[in-house]
Amino acid sequence: MRRSYATRPNIPPWVYTDGVSSAPTRDHWERIFESRPEADRSWTQPVPTTSLTSIVRSGVSTDEPIIDIGGGAARLVDHLLAEGHTDLTVLDVSRSALCQVRARVGHDAPVEWIHADITTWSPTRQYRVWHDRAVFHFLVDDAEVAHYCRISAAGVAPGGHLVIATFAPEGPTSCSGLPVRRWSAASLSDAFSGGFETVTSTTVGHHTPGGGVQPFTWVTMRRSA
């Protein structure tokens, strides 16, 4: 049975589009989400255990804001809603992905849906947790990396947390037909050192639906005061 939610006036009723200016990137991901069922997407996780554990350990309460960068049609938002979170945001470059997950969790769920390209988007509010599993590693241009580091520092409240996961140095060199930039815990900590201090780091093997194992670097950082 689908859960019913109280109306939240600060949550837009539908997808909000902001700065989706990179047509090749947008079109690439639209094709992926429109043509591949969930079981054929290499990043699929029925239960995003490491994400959920990292968010719980951050100490965020259920009424504090969390954003999932590149949440797509992933199931993290489903689990956070089930745990009682009431201020969630999901951002993705694919409108199809956002429509899929919104249809799944219900149109009245307390979620803000942002259709945007992370390379051109800037946050308009601050979050207690900024979660990104497998978006940052698609930024192979130094200017895009610098932009991401700036907007994450602006978008996380002092004392809040950035939870980020990328392919590890021994991981794949591409994903879904696009090149990636692999990161170690040390290199991630260095990239974000202007606004964050590292709290924990680990390497976790992601078991893909196809039976492969992809090593991910996971780092949780605290926003400096």
Image (spheres, grey):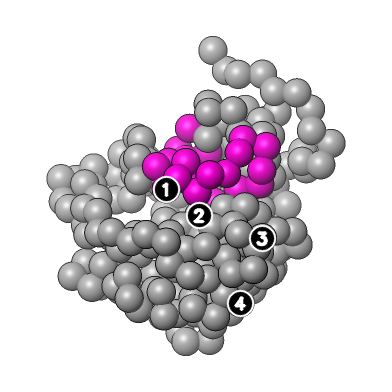
Amino acid at pointer 1:
Ser
Circle 2 sits in a helix, a strand or a loop, which is it? strand
| Residue wearing tag 1 | 54
User: Where's the N terminus, which quadrant?
Assistant: top right
Percent across and percent down for residue 18 are: 71, 62
If you read the primary sequence from the N terminus, does the residue marked by circle 1 or circle 3 appear first?
1
Distance Cα–Cα, label 4 vs label 1: 22 Å
| Residue wearing tag 3 | 157
Amino acid at pointer 2:
His
- Look at the image and say whether residue 66 sits in the magenta stretch: yes
Distance Cα–Cα, label 4 vs label 2: 15 Å
Amino acid at pointer 4:
Arg
Camera-nearest residue between 154 and 18: 154
Percent across and percent down for residue 186 are: 32, 76
Q: Residues within 10 Å of mark 3 (few under 14, many from 20)?
A: many
Residue located 59% across and 57% down the image: 160
Q: Please, is residue 203 above or below residue 112 in the view?
A: below
- Give yes or no for contact between labels 2 and 3 (Cβ–Cβ under 8 Å): no
If you read the primary sequence from the N terminus, does the residue marked by circle 4 or circle 3 appear first?
4
Which picture quadrant has residue 154?
bottom right
